[in-house]
Image (cartoon, rainbow, N blue to C red):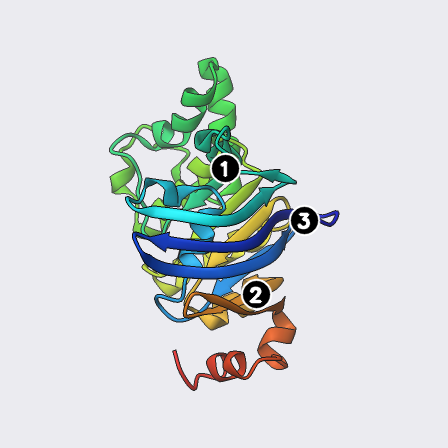
């Protein structure tokens, strides 16, 4: 693993039951910037994303061979605590999933689980997380309101704030804007770009334009294999693989 690498995957193969979903993926993900995973539905990109914080562990029948290193530590050893991994590697899902609680309690939830803090400390950290998610000015006067009263775009940014509140080193996004309107999508993309300057960000997206706008590096997956992985500009303008060129030019997918 080279300096500046956050994740290193070596020969990763994933199965659900007997079916192979991802085969022999080897790649390094840098510590800084945004890395995008693209490819048609069923290509394995979300499976690989969820390997990075062991979210696949909760799927019955899932198994993994190969190795996944986070800062040079293999996160799939028998002694590794998956919960400890997920504290370091947060995740934002395709559809916003706020808890049936107030805006404040949604953001404070993870902090209350992880450590004992005073109400004053929680208030400071909740504000910091909401500011980082670009939501503070919109909700600061109604923190006690149930989160379900927010718009879809606001709920997604609330979920980002909830993930940021526990101060992860990595944030994973699985199609974070697929259910949002164009204005909310733009706000989420701006947030992804900003977060990429502060921590490791990995995003799965079906939207090729979105990948080109937010990602420093892009990986193209097809039929469970990593076909090409390169700086985003190079992958979109001068791909080395014919399958990549066909996909990014819109000839299939």
Q: Earlier in the sequence, mark 3 or mark 2?
A: 3
Label 2 sits on a secondary structure element that is strand
Q: 132 or 117, which is in the foreground?
A: 117
Q: Residue furthest front?
A: 18
Q: Nearer the viewer, mark 1 or mark 3?
A: 3
State how far apart marks 1 and 2 are (Cα).
Answer: 23 Å
Is 192 positioned to the left or the right of 92 in the image?
right
Location of residue 12 in the rendering, given as x and y in whole percent from the top left corner: 51, 54
**Circle 3 SS class:** strand
Measure the C-alpha gap from mark 3 to mark 2. 15 Å
Q: Is residue 207 above or below residue 113?
A: below
The Cα atoms of the two marked residues, 1 and 3, are separated by 21 Å
Residue 5: which disc? 3
Of 25 and 101, nearer the camera is 25
Question: Which is more N-terminal, label 3 or label 1?
Answer: 3
Mark 1 or 2: the one toward you? 2
Tell me residue 18's x, y (percent). Answer: 31, 56
| Mark 2 lies on residue | 218
What residue do we see at 49% from left, 62% from top?
37
Decide which of tag 1 and tag 2 comes sooner along the chain: 1
Question: Is residue 139 visible in this depiction of the protein?
Answer: yes
Q: Give the numbered dot on residue 81.
A: none
Circles 3 and 2, Cβ within 8 Å, touching? The answer is no
Q: Nearer the viewer, mark 3 or mark 2?
A: 3
Question: Can you name the residue that lies furthest to the right here?
Answer: 3
The circle on residue 164 is 1
């Amino acid at each position: 693993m080279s300096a500046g690498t956050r994740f290193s995957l070596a020969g990763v193969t994933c199965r659900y039951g007997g079916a192979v979903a991802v085969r022999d993926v080897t790649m390094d993900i840098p510590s800084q910037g945004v890395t995008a995973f693209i490819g048609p539905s069923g290509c394995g990109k979300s499976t690989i994303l969820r390997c990075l914080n062991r979210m696949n562990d909760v799927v019955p029948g899932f198994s993994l061979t190969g190795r996944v290193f986070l800062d040079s530590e293999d996160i799939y050893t028998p002694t590794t605590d998956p919960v400890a991994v997920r504290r370091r590697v947060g995740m934002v899902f395709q559809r916003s999933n706020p808890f049936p609680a107030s805006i404040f309690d949604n953001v404070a939830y993870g902090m209350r689980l992880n450590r004992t803090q005073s109400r004053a400390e929680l208030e400071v950290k909740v504000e910091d997380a909401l500011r980082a998610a670009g939501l503070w000015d919109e909700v600061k006067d109604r923190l006690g309101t149930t989160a379900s009263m927010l718009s879809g775009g606001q709920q997604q940014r609330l979920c980002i704030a909830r993930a940021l509140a526990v101060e992860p080193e990595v944030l994973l996004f699985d199609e974070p804007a697929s259910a949002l309107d164009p204005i909310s999508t733009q706000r989420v993309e701006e947030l992804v770009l900003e977060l990429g300057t502060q921590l490791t960000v990995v995003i799965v997206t079906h939207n090729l334009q979105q990948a080109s706008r937010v990602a420093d590096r892009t990986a193209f997956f097809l039929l469970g294999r990593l076909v090409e992985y390169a700086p985003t500009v190079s992958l979109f303008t001068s791909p080395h693989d014919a399958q990549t060129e066909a996909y990014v030019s819109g000839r299939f997918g």
